[in-house]
Image: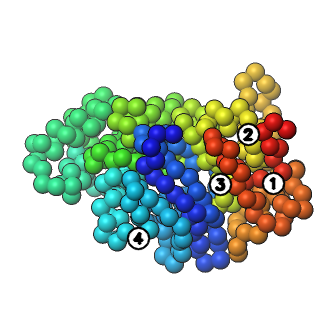
Amino acid sequence: MTPALLEVADLSVQIGRVHAVTNATFAVGEGEFFGVVGESGSGKSMTARAIIGLLPAGAVMSGSIRLAGEELTAATRRRLRELRGGSIGFVFQDALAALDPVYTIGKQLAEIQRTHGSVGAAAARRRSLDLLGEVGISDPARCLDSYPHQLSGGMRQRAVIATALISDPRLIIADEPTTALDVTIQRQVLELLQQIVEQRKTAVMLITHDLGVVAETCDRVAVFYGGVIVEEALTVALFAEPRHPYTRALLDSLPKLGQQRTFRAIPGAPIRVVGRLTSCPFAPRCAHATASCASALPAETDLGDRRFRCCESPQVGE
Ligand SMILES: Nc1ncnc2c1ncn2[C@@H]1O[C@H](COP(=O)(O)OP(=O)(O)OP(=O)(O)O)[C@@H](O)[C@H]1O
């Protein structure tokens, strides 16, 4: 991994009795494309919201979140505001909601530039045109004068990515940025994020429920289940040799080239963790679970290039 830009250690988030995230530890390197994958309710968004300081009212958080060495859990609200849209850019699933429907794209890009420091109208327009060109909008001048509803879904998401780039962020958190798009456009937006990582050396933390998306884009990936990171590894290693039964089940549920399209669904229902975790969250759905899985949250096995929480996974070499 490149030197760590974002370091999350032992992060837990509790909302009322729901333990949304439990002891999550991971790091994202400078210029790394890092994936966070898991099914609905597994704690991906709460992790992202903890990083940008936007947890729901009443949420209780513990642990450490460091960005370029700065402890964010100790940051003031003003400092967190500075970081959001400063060193940290974000892109969410719903581009239409991220843009103001009553202003043109040009006005919105100019306004964001103004909040980052005084900039004249002509300079703001030039920068906006450059950014829209960079994100692959073929007619930036026309886009600048358009309202969000006049753009296609893919163009809107590109415009949102342009707004995230205004502050030259070191990290972009993209939460399901392509879920609302059709497959061809989805691929183009993912390629754009890859291009940003390669050319700007910006780190991207991509949150998705789709392992196929991870396979196409991410250098490394953390797999969440029930608010716990059950496995983290280089993407190629994770796909070649998944160590956690949940990761294996997720991979088995992907369609394979050349095989009959029979999807192997994971039996049982996703868990909502109410109360402190005292067992492996996946144990109720795991074909390999034993009594020890039900008696404590498995400790983390750290093999250097990968980490996983499973007491039944065979050790390397066995
Ligand atoms: N505002 C809230 N109040 C109480 N519980 C919440 C709230 N938001 C989320 N949760 C719970 O926190 C847990 C983690 O949710 P989170 O949104 O992080 O999951 P996710 O993996 O991002 O899922 P999705 O892909 O559906 O967004 C879930 O059990 C969810 O029900």
Q: Whole-percent x and y of residue 216? A: 57, 32
Answer few, some or many: residues within 10 Å of disc 4's Cα (few below 14, many 20 plus, some between 14 and 19): few
Q: CA distance from mark 3 to mark 4?
A: 24 Å
- Residue assigned mark 1: 311
* Residue 298 appears in view: yes
Element class at badge 1: loop
* Horizontal side of residue 169 vs 229, given as left or right: left
Element class at badge 2: loop
Q: Is residue 297 above or below residue 124?
A: below
Answer few, some or many: residues within 10 Å of disc 3's Cα (few below 14, many 20 plus, some between 14 and 19): many
Q: CA distance from mark 3 to mark 2?
A: 14 Å
Closer to the camera, 110 or 213?
Answer: 213
Answer few, some or many: residues within 10 Å of disc 2's Cα (few below 14, many 20 plus, some between 14 and 19): many
Dot 3 or dot 2: first in sequence order is 3
Mark carried by residue 242: 2
Q: CA distance from mark 4 to mark 2?
A: 36 Å
Element class at badge 3: strand
